[in-house]
Amino acid sequence: MKKVAKLIGLSIILLILISISTLIDQKQSSFAVVNKVLTLFIGAWFPKLFRYSVDLVDNDNWKASQRKLERAGILKKNTIIRISFAYLFRIKVDGKYFLVPNTRSHKYQPVGGAYKFCNEEAQYLSNSMSVENDDRVPVNKTTQNDYRLLVKNKHLRDFVKRFDITEHRENGSNLSREFEEEIFSTGILTKKSFGSNLSYRYCGRHMTDIQYGSIFKHFELLLADIFEVQLSEKQEELFRTLMEEKSDKYYFATSDEIKSFGVSTVTNKFTDNIATHTPKIITENTEKLGKREKSSPQIEVSLN
């Protein structure tokens, strides 16, 4: 709304100046100097009007941050942007969130991970946008075709648009891969006990501004689609049983624990053991998510 108000305000001022200039031009030549001054003012207002018009089109925060960095001369056309596009599961039982350890940092985080793309998409991205693999994360059998990539700034908007429309990648219709890998393959639960179906619904999308990442030494754009797992009564009981048993394979965290990343001044626990992206899944942050739907359908997939 602020952008719209500024645009309307600038437009009104510009129209007033143009009207005054036109009236003066129709009068005596003694007003020629005043008219020249007004013409200069009009010339100064046009760029501002154009800028706010562009800002109004950039209705996503990440686009606005990109435009701001470009205007400041910080982002160039060929500046490399690191992207990491992932999906995260919200698994909530009795007010606590089920987390698993990250294989690299060993900090607890939601079940989920980077989206994967097919070979057809890899070829398209390479040929059309010169996209490369993220050189900070070793590419192996596990990480191959992950949406952890390096994209030139000039291609970034087309890349995000392509991500939303391509059929050659993992999408919300079946996200069972990470669930199976992080819960069944680790031995936390068995597929037999959990059942043959996984149900979840889409909550929305968290997307960061473009910022410089001190760890990977690149400007970054991070995307996380949040999905809430719809547990049956039987499945809920399985997680309640886990809650009663201590294990380093998982952790049930409260909202407050997640927001403090596991640090507690009450218990003198000053080491953070919860990953910084975990707050994206907590219920009270749902309203901050983009691309939310009024009534998101429940998706049910069969487990292999």
Image (cartoon, helix red, strand yellow):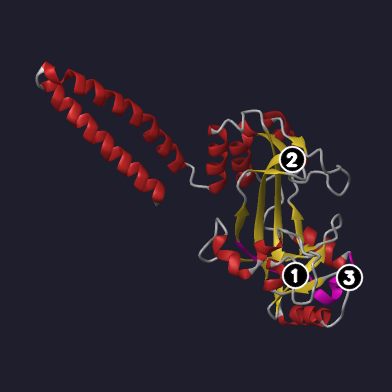
Furthest residue toward left: 28
Q: Residue 256 placed where, x, y %? A: 68, 72
Residue 25 position (above or below residue 221)? above
Q: Residue 8 carries which label?
A: none
**Helix, strand or loop under label 2:** strand
Write the residue at 74% across / 79% down. 236
Q: Can residue 21 be seen in this view?
A: yes
Closer to viewer: mark 3 or mark 2: 3
Name the residue beneath numbered marker 1: 197
Write the residue at 55% across / 56% down. 291
**Helix, strand or loop under label 1:** strand
Q: Which of marks 3 and 2 is nearer the N terminus?
A: 2
For the record, the magenta segment spans 186-203
Q: Is residue 227 visible?
A: no
Residue 155 position (above or below residue 90)? above
Name the residue beneath numbered marker 2: 149
Calculate the distance from the C-alpha at mark 3 to the C-alpha at mark 1: 26 Å
Q: Is residue 287 magenta?
A: no
Front residue (pair 29, 117): 29
Name the residue beneath numbered marker 3: 248
Q: Please rate how many residues cluster around mark 1, counting C-alpha atoms within 10 Å: few if below 14, some from 14 to 19, many from 20.
A: some
| Mark 3 touches mark 2? (CB < 8 Å) | no
Write the residue at 73% across / 68% down. 198
Calculate the distance from the C-alpha at mark 3 to the C-alpha at mark 2: 31 Å
Q: Which of marks 3 and 1 is nearer the N terminus?
A: 1
Residue type (three-letter) at the residue carrying disc 2:
Leu
Residue 47 in the figure: left or right of residue 81 = left
Q: Quadrant of residue 245?
A: bottom right
Front residue (pair 30, 276): 30
